[in-house]
Image (cartoon, grey):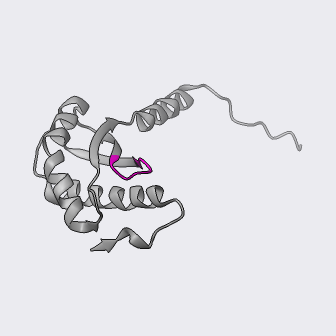
Amino acid sequence: MINIKHFSYGRHEKVGGLIKEEISDIILNHLNDPRIGFVTVTEVTVTPDLRHATVFVSFYNSDKNEGMKGLMHAVGFIRCEIGKRIKMRYVPEIVFKFDSSIEGGAHVLEIIDSLDIPEEIDTTE
């Protein structure tokens, strides 16, 4: 069990990092909901009072709406597991939000790949 009492500077950011690691592990190893599929926890932000956490997730090759429903269905279990793994006075309320940045990056790469850019011509001759 991790005791967060020893954190002082940037405490909520450090707690957010711990929560991100634990939620990633919980989703990967302890949730059996087929709606969730392959999900990545991209970021966790925690309020300075440590009472609320926003968990940003992205989905790969699965329906994001169904995946979000699966995560919201499991939020109580996830909070309970966080409480067991990280010693905190209050276990934060968890809200999941879809992170579209990975999809946006993939779209930009598709656009770059589709451009017809000629290879460089050797002018040293």
Residue 44 versus residue 93: which sits nearer the camera? 93
* Residue 87 horizontal/vertical position (percent): 28, 68
Residue 3 versus residue 73: which sits nearer the camera? 3
Give the quarter of the figure containing the C terminus: top right
Q: Residue at x 33, y 36 (%)?
A: 97
Q: Residue at x 37, y 62 (%)?
A: 18
* Residue 120 horizontal/vertical position (percent): 74, 37
Residue 60 versus residue 113: which sits nearer the camera? 60
Task: Look at the picture and state if 109 lies above or below 15.
Answer: above
Q: Residue at x 78, y 36 (%)?
A: 121
Q: Is residue 113 left or right of residue 43?
A: right
* Residue 102 horizontal/vertical position (percent): 43, 38
In magenta, the rendered stretch is 44-52
* Residue 83 horizontal/vertical position (percent): 22, 61
48 magenta-colored: yes
Task: Look at the picture and state if 41 lies above or below 123.
Answer: below
Q: Quadrant of residue 82?
A: bottom left
Give the quarter of the figure containing the N terminus: bottom left
Residue farthest to the right?
Answer: 125
